[in-house]
Image (spheres, helix red, strand yellow):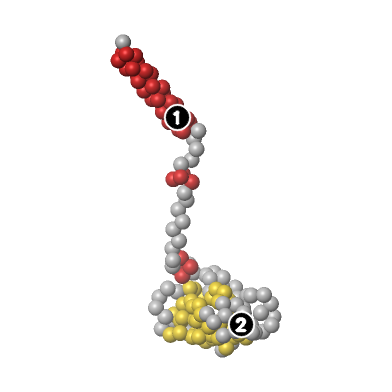
Amino acid sequence: MKIMRLVVILLVIAAVASIGAFLYSKRTVSTGLPTIADNTFSIAPNKNSAQQTPSTGEIIISNTNPTREIVVEASEYKFTPSTVTIKKGESVKITLKNAGAMPHDWFVENMGGASIDMTSAGSTNSIVIKASQTGTFTTYCSIGSHRKLGMVGKLIVQ
Ligand SMILES: [Cu+2]
């Protein structure tokens, strides 16, 4: 009978298809390939992490509201003013204004966290710092040989 034959053929097709699907799913599982989720490590940058991590010295990067701002102008090859004076315990925003033609930055020596990142010509960058101890610290531009060429200054904490 034609109908019986058709039904048998359909059953065979269905059986082959389901066995195939079963083997396929089995294969997917048994390969143990990591899923996208396994491979995804979470990158959840904390925007304030740099500001919340105290540096190793007496100067910490503060995320509290600064009471004032000191603008340091950078050019080839000097800082103006070269000496920045702050008071112990006060949060001060230091802004590096690049008035030169080359990129510059502003580092407080031996205070890894206390630095203003590379600032391109015509741009400004800031940090808020707070010093817990008095002292005089060397500041400099870490780019190329700018330090040797004169981009050195002082941070005095009174
Ligand atoms: Cu420089």
Visible residue check, residue 78: yes
**In the picture shown, does residue 144 fall above or below 150?**
above
Q: Amino acid at mark 1?
A: Tyr
Circles 2 and 1 in contact, beta carbons < 8 Å: no
Residue 69 position in % (x across, y down): 45, 84
Question: Label 2 neighbourhood size at 10 Å, few (<14), some (14-19), many (20+)?
Answer: few
SS of the residue at dot 2? Answer: loop
Question: Label 1 neighbourhood size at 10 Å, few (<14), some (14-19), many (20+)?
Answer: few
Q: Nearer the viewer, mark 2 or mark 1?
A: 1
Residue beneath disc 2:
101
**In the picture shown, does residue 81 fall above or below 44?**
below
Foreground residue among 157 and 41: 41
Foreground residue among 56 and 39: 39
Q: Earlier in the sequence, mark 2 or mark 1?
A: 1
Q: Ligand 1 closer than 8 Å to the CB at disc 1?
A: no
Residue 152 position in % (x across, y down): 63, 83
Question: In this view, which residue lies farthest toward the top?
Answer: 1
Q: How many marks?
A: 2
Q: Amino acid at mark 2?
A: Ala
Visible residue check, residue 89: no
Residue 149 position in % (x across, y down): 69, 82
Residue beneath disc 1:
24
